[in-house]
């Protein structure tokens, strides 16, 4: 049973508490982690698909870096790359040990190069983050109604182009009838909507929240003939099969830090924003009062956290149904040529070890945090 997306911080914490009884599978990453702490933290490099660490990703970047990775005996360096493909290539050649990226890029890589050693061990966005959206007062309500409409995307090479085409096909519409318009990012996106330059947007949860923070309320379009909420497995945490085999404790510790950061952010999203600003001060909104900067940032953080929820009681997990629905979407959009066996790219056995930590302690830490 998948936990409902609107679970909120309390439900996530309550669900996660059950994971504390997972046993001694990975108590503090076992003796290896303790020895690593005694000798000094182990250096880990993580690939990130953009140069800028956006605020909505605080729960899997700045929060674990500030609070949790060191406790796992890890000294993590995050390297930003110009796109998910570049991050995937860096993982493949061993430039980074782990990578955080969209699973559409991951499955595209594996579709083209079946011999790749990349494997997904964690899902840091398991809800569907990329429904098309319209202004609140738009007459459009369903995805199929986008026929003949102008749809704004950041650029024409963006993955949302193919995703919306696939959604259109799944909803019984004609993908060829869509007209995509590049509108840029941030302020440019908001201006395109405000001036009715486009009829709809094909972006993602955090970008929609950023537009709404400018005073432009949006509404996501729904499927008329299918339920988009069944699609998950949107963004994944990767490593290489050989690295996992040789350094399972490091991989588990890295993603356990993210699981802790996720729980922390759900309990105290304000703290996650302040921690992110401390890590990346240039990303704090400028020329506005602190309370306004917090309001805007919180909208993006909370928009993403609504798409981050436990599955079968485990943070970072994905169900077989979610993965299958996501592959169907990519197949219909022409992003992949055929479905892959999930056993070839998804290591669900690692998730229980990742969740083997004292959830109540992290919750208490989040509630007591002062910075």
Image (cartoon, helix red, strand yellow):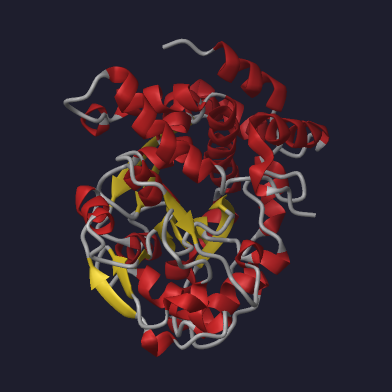
Residue at position x 71%, y 22% from top? Answer: 360
Residue 160 occupies which quadrant of the picture?
Answer: bottom left
Q: Residue 300 placed where, x, y %?
A: 41, 40
Residue at position x 45%, y 66% from top? Answer: 139
Q: Is residue 30 left or right of residue 268?
A: right
Residue at position x 76%, y 39% from top? Answer: 25
Q: Is residue 241 visible?
A: no
- Quarter placement of the N terminus: bottom right
- Front one among 196 and 3: 196
Q: Is residue 353 left or right of residue 218?
A: right
- Front one among 101 and 189: 189
- Front one among 23 and 175: 175
Q: Residue 316 placed where, x, y %?
A: 62, 48
21 lies above or below 143: above
Residue 230 occupies which quadrant of the picture?
Answer: bottom right
Q: Residue furthest left?
A: 287
Residue at position x 83%, y 33% from top? Answer: 21
Q: Is residue 125 visible?
A: yes
Q: Residue 283 placed where, x, y %?
A: 25, 33
* Count of numbered badges drawn on the protein: 0
- Quarter placement of the C terminus: top left
- Front one among 12 and 78: 12
Q: Residue 66 placed where, x, y %?
A: 42, 25
Q: Is residue 49 left or right of residue 23?
A: left
320 lies above or below 245: below
């Amino acid at each position: 049973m998948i936990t409902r997306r609107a679970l909120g911080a309390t439900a996530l914490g309550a669900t996660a508490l059950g994971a504390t009884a997972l046993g001694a599978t990975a108590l503090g990453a076992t003796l290896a982690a303790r020895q690593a702490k005694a000798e000094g933290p182990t250096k880990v490099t993580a690939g990130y698909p953009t140069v800028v660490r956006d605020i909505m990703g605080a729960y899997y970047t700045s929060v674990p870096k500030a609070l949790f990775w060191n406790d796992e005996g890890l000294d993590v360096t995050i390297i930003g790359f110009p796109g998910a493909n570049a991050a995937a290539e860096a993982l493949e050649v061993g430039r980074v040990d782990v990578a955080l990226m969209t699973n559409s890029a991951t499955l595209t890589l594996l579709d083209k190069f079946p011999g790749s050693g990349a494997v997904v061990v964690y899902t840091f966005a398991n809800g569907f983050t990329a429904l098309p959206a319209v202004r609140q007062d738009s007459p459009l309500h369903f995805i199929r109604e986008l026929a003949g409409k102008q749809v704004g995307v950041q650029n024409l090479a963006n993955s949302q182009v193919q995703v919306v085409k696939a959604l259109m096909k799944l909803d019984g519409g004609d993908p060829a009838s869509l007209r995509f318009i590049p509108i840029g990012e941030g302020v440019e996106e908001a201006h395109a909507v405000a001036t009715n330059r486009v009829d709809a947007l094909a972006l993602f949860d955090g970008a929609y929240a950023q537009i709404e923070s400018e005073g432009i309320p949006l509404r996501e379009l729904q499927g008329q003939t299918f339920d988009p909420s069944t699609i998950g497995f949107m963004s994944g945490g990767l490593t290489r099969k050989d690295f996992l085999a040789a350094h399972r404790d490091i991989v588990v510790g890295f993603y356990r830090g993210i699981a802790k950061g996720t729980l922390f952010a759900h309990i105290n999203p304000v703290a996650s924003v302040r921690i992110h600003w401390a890590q990346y001060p240039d990303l704090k909104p400028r020329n506005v009062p602190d309370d306004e900067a917090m309001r805007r940032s919180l909208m993006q953080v909370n928009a993403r956290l609504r798409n981050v929820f436990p599955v079968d009681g485990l943070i970072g997990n994905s169900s077989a149904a979610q993965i299958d629905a996501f592959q169907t979407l990519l197949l219909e959009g022409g992003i992949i040529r055929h479905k892959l066996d999930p056993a070839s790219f998804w290591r669900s056995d690692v998730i229980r070890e990742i969740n083997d930590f004292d959830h109540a302690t992290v919750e208490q830490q989040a509630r007591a945090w002062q910075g």
